[in-house]
Image (tube, rainbow, N blue to C red):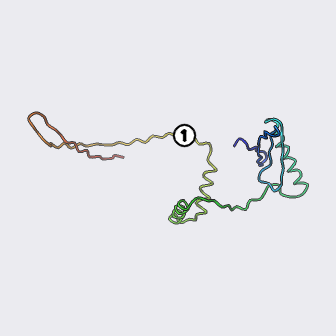
Amino acid sequence: MKNVLRYKGFLGSKEISNDNKCIHGKLLFIDDLVTYEAESPAQIEVEFKDAVDDYLDTCRKLGREPLKPFSGTFNVRIGSELHQTLAHYATTNETSINDVVKKALIQYLNKTEQKEIVHNHKHTVTVKYEQTLVEVTERDMQWKKEPTLTLVN
C-alpha cells in the first residue's frame, strides 16, 4: 500500500489534506495517538521517522511497551455457504476451522510477488479408428468413423 510508511517495525499513515494543504499521518497499531505532518511528500517520511524515534524514546522513559498488543482473535464474516464449505472441509480433513483459516492466512500472507508461471504437459494420445461400412451405392461410398481413444503415459 503506497499510503503506509514503514520504519523500525512501525506502520504510519500518509494522507493529503486539501483543506490545510499539507500531508499528515499517525502511527498505526499503538495505544497512544502520535501524529506528524509535512508540506511535501519527501518531508513526510522524515517526520514519520522522527515521530517513531520520539515515541520509542518516550516509551523507554515511561518504562512501557510501545506497540499495541493484539489478542490473537478476530471475527470474520464469510457468509453461510462458505462457512458450511469450510466446516465440511475441516471435518473431512480431521482438523479445525481455526487451523484451516490460520494455514490459509499464513500461506496468503507469505506469498511473494505473484509471477506468471508457465508450464507445459506432454500427453501422448493414440487414436485408433475402426472404419465400418455404412452404405454402399454404385456412385459413392460413405464410411462411418468411430474413434477409440487410448491414453499412453
Choose top left, top right, bottom left or bottom right for residue 5. Answer: top right
Amino acid type at circle 1 is Glu
Q: Position of residue 12 (x, y in %)?
A: 77, 46
Compared across the picture, whether 95 is left or right of 49 comes to left
Q: Up-down: is 129 above or below 79?
A: above
Q: Up-down: is 98 above or below 46?
A: below
Name the residue: 58% across, 65% down: 96
Front-most of residues 74 and 115: 74
Element type where label 1 sits in the image: loop
Query: On the image, numbered disc 1 is attached to which residue?
Result: 116
Q: Where is residue 21 in the image (x, y as percent from the top left)?
A: 81, 37
Q: Up-down: is 43 above or below 108?
A: above
Compared across the picture, whether 56 is left or right of 108 comes to right
Specify the farthest residue to the top: 139
Choose top left, top right, bottom left or bottom right for residue 125. Answer: top left
Q: Where is residue 67 in the image (x, y as percent from the top left)?
A: 80, 55
Compared across the picture, whether 142 is left or right of 13 comes to left
Q: Where is residue 144 in the image (x, y as percent from the top left)?
A: 19, 42
Name the residue: 77% across, 53% down: 29
